[in-house]
Amino acid sequence: MTLSAVARFVREAIVEPDHIARARQTALELGAAPVSASVGSQCAVVAAASGARTMIEIGTGAGVSGLWLMHGAPQAVLTTIDSEPEHLAAARAAFSSSSVPVSRARFITGRAADVLPRMNEAAYDIVLIDADPENVIDYVAHGLRLARPGGTVLVPRVLAGGRVADPVARDPRTSDLRSLITETLGSDQVVSSLSTLDEGLLQIATRRTAEGRTP
């Protein structure tokens, strides 16, 4: 069986909850480019396995990735940031129709580069980064600062449609993603993994020392 056949089987096997599927349709209509169901389900597993209570999302879209995170950690509080008011409005509506309590979702309108420096350090169990690919390196640096010791930074779309594997592709975005992947996977300061299904998902877990601090 070919790798493409395996990937197709996995995609078809995933059952997306109805409320997330509705949000996905809205996102597509808005051109908000939601994460795939396979990547969303991986994010949900990370949120569930970590027992996440506080999560922050850089790039709301129409709420698909946020709903997947809440699917994995329904008791968590999610802070989500986006510069597009229309996308945030769609996400609010999706969360409301999905019966997510108002107290568990905080929507911030603004550019991530302006908002992130004001967010509390080491305050989040999960940090998901899905905005402004040209700024991905800076956002990951912020994400590692915002994640608590033992927390996880999630970065979807890191494969750039497969371009990261093409040595001829040297545009700034692809080069940044390629560097991010190789440096993260080679670092002894974090525990990391790269999923290659669909758009890809880089998972970066901050280390916890015996005293409960990162090294």
Image (cartoon, rainbow, N blue to C red):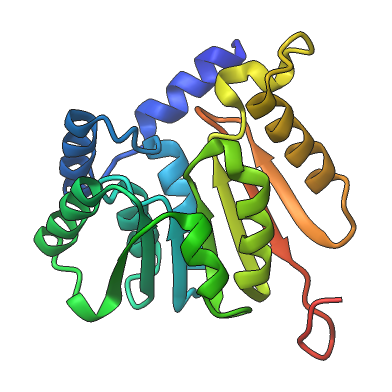
- Label total for image: 0
State the residue in front, 112 or 18.
Answer: 112
Q: Is residue 50 visible?
A: no
State the residue in front, 117 or 32.
Answer: 117
Image quadrant where residue 171 sits: top right
Image quadrant where residue 4 sits: top right
Q: Answer left or right for 153 relative to 58.
A: right
Name the spot of residue 210 as percent of width and height, x first: 84, 86
> Quarter holding the N terminus?
top right
The residue at the far bottom in this view is 211
Name the spot of residue 150 as percent of width and height, x first: 69, 74
State the residue in front, 186 or 56.
Answer: 56
Q: Is residue 205 visible?
A: yes
State the residue in front, 57 or 205.
Answer: 57
Residue 89 against residue 124 in the figure, above or below = above
Name the spot of residue 12 as percent of width and height, x first: 36, 26
Q: Please tell me which residue is depicted at 31% across the width and 45% down the height of the picture.
A: 61
Q: Please tell me which residue is depicted at 40% across the width and 38% down the height of the picture.
A: 35
> Quarter holding the C terminus?
bottom right
Residue 123 against residue 100 in the figure, above or below = below
Residue 5 against residue 142 in the figure, above or below = above
Q: Answer left or right for 189 relative to 99.
A: right
Q: Please tell me which residue is depicted at 61% across the width and 58% down the height of the picture.
A: 153
Name the spot of residue 43 as percent of width and height, x first: 48, 52
Q: Answer left or right for 28 relative to 114.
A: left
Q: Please tell me which residue is depicted at 39% across the width and 62% down the height of the picture.
A: 72
